[in-house]
Amino acid sequence: MLRLECPFTETAVTGVSRFYVSVRWPWSEVDPQAENIRWNGERALPTPEADEWEIFRTEPAEAALKSGDTCRVGIPPTVVHVLAVHHFDPPLVTGMLPRPASYLDVLPQGETYDPELDDQGYALDPVGGEPIRIELLFRPYAFLEPGDEVADRDGHVWRFDAAWDWHPLDEARAGAPAWPLALLSRKGEPTPEEVAAVARATADGSHAGELERWTELTLARPATRWFAECRTAAG
């Protein structure tokens, strides 16, 4: 869970249509070394009729603007949850500078991820040219790393891939481990400090508690398939 904000900056409206308002982008630069990609220095932001979510907004609102107007563009305080993180090595060529080395796929507060949809979420460069302030509100299972293997209270062994993506490594049925947890492996043998940190973090609480806090903040729920399996496993 993140809170995003970007100071509103003055710019010019370069074009208006029913569904989009184009503005001169005040932060990024044209990448002169980009082959077959020539960015024109503008960015199109959706109007309400486009029915498309965009974290950057204008002041005045897009629907009130016309070509040649001066406006401000930025991000009002916005709460999102992260769907995925993508890394690019070398950085991705987009026609703009700086070239992104990573993207966060995010959804707005109140929207649940739907695996049946082809295009959902918003790709955000967390260290791009825009001066975006990113505040971490909550990270479920912040004390674990992807690939960690743990033993739960009932002696079952699990692999942690993400907060809502647990894989039993023994006869445990699908669902999630029962706290407290004992760290067995973290890219090999974990250090005593790592083992102690996981033990402390799970001495109280439960998987259900992590899920409840995440749900309260996101106003959403995990992917439908996982949520159904977890409910079934919980009885």
Image (spheres, rainbow, N blue to C red):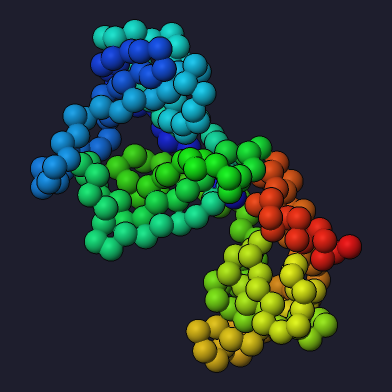
Task: Reply above or below: 158 against 121.
Answer: below
Side of 112 where 33 appears, left or right: left
137 vs 233, nearest the viewer: 233
Q: Which residue is drawn at 31% across and 56% down?
A: 101
Q: Quadrant of residue 207?
A: bottom right
> Can the viewer see residue 55 in this picture?
yes
139 vs 156, nearest the viewer: 156
Q: Which residue is drawn at 56% across and 72% down?
A: 145
What is the tally of numbered marks visible in this picture?
0
Q: Residue at x 45, y 50 (%)?
A: 104
Residue lying farthest to the front in this orientation? 116
74 vs 62, nearest the viewer: 62
Q: Position of residue 108 (x, y in %)?
A: 57, 38
Q: Which residue is drawn at 50% across and 84% down?
A: 187
Side of 80 where 95 appears, left or right: left
Quadrant, the C terminus: bottom right
Q: Where is residue 85 in the image (x, y as percent from the top left)?
A: 45, 57
Q: Position of residue 231 (x, y in %)?
A: 81, 58
185 vs 139, nearest the viewer: 185
Task: Reply above or below: 103 against 5.
Answer: below
Q: Quadrant of residue 192?
A: bottom right
Q: In which quarter of the image is residue 230?
A: bottom right
Task: Reply above or below: 104 against 52.
Answer: below
Task: Reply above or below: 23 against 130.
Answer: above
Side of 114 where 47 appears, left or right: left
Q: Where is residue 113 in the image (x, y as percent from the top left)?
A: 60, 46
> Can the viewer see residue 197 in this picture?
no
